[in-house]
Image: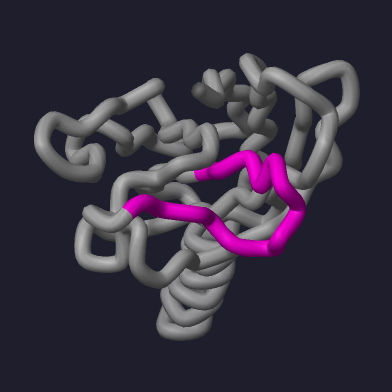
Amino acid sequence: MKKIILAAIFILSGVLSALAQETQTVTVEFNGMKSDKGDLYIALYNSEDSFLKKPLKGTIAKVIDKKATVVFKDIAIGTYAISAFHDANNNKKMDTNFFGIPKEPIGISNDATGFMGPPKYKNAKFKVLKNIKLSIKIN
């Protein structure tokens, strides 16, 4: 009897471990760019504390026909947000004015916008429970 219970515990722990490590794919389509010049810089965040500060993952995409698509692989089930900016002058940084307001086109998941400051995580966040596809407007 002990062997059966022990075997069941091992099997159950293996199944739970496999479920906990399940990862998903997040595909993001960006549109609204006014030109194909420069690259699109994209950041994926997994918490309110890190939002717009320290991304979990980041990538750079080429703009083709005023659109870009990126795929984030191996994303754990959870809550995330995305920010992006179109480096139209190709200087590899987001240009801002004296007040820190972006001079280059930006986009945030859920097309969230800020009022008197940057967008809030609560407006940009989305859940990843399975493979998903998002669309973000860059303006």
Q: What percent of the width, then of the height, locates residue 61?
A: 79, 45
Up-down relation of residue 10 to residue 97 (above or below): below
Above-or-below relation of 14 to 60 = below
Residue 53 visible to an observer of this rendering = yes
Residue drawn at (40%, 45%) of the image? 102
Q: Residue at x 75, y 53 (%)?
A: 90
| Res. 12 visible in picture | no
Q: Nearer the viewer, residue 39 or 43?
A: 39
Of 53 and 38, nearer the camera is: 38
- Residue sticking out furthest to the right: 64
Q: In this picture, which residue range is highlighted in magenta?
A: 84-97
- Residue displayed at 66% across by 47% down: 87
Q: Is residue 37 left or right of residue 14?
A: right
Residue name at image x 53 percent, y 33 percent: 105
Closest to the observer, 100 or 49: 100
- The single residue placed furthest to the left in the displayed view is 116
51 left or right of 16 in image: left
Location of residue 135 with respect to 117 vertically, above or below: above
Place of residue 49 in the rendered image (x, y in percent of width and height, measured from the top left): 21, 66
Q: Residue 80 at x, y = what percent?
A: 39, 47
Q: Position of residue 136 (x, y in %)?
A: 54, 23
Q: Is residue 46 magenta?
A: no
Left or right? Give the position of 28 relative to 80: right
Magenta span contains residue 96: yes
Majority secondary structure of the magenta segment?
Answer: loop
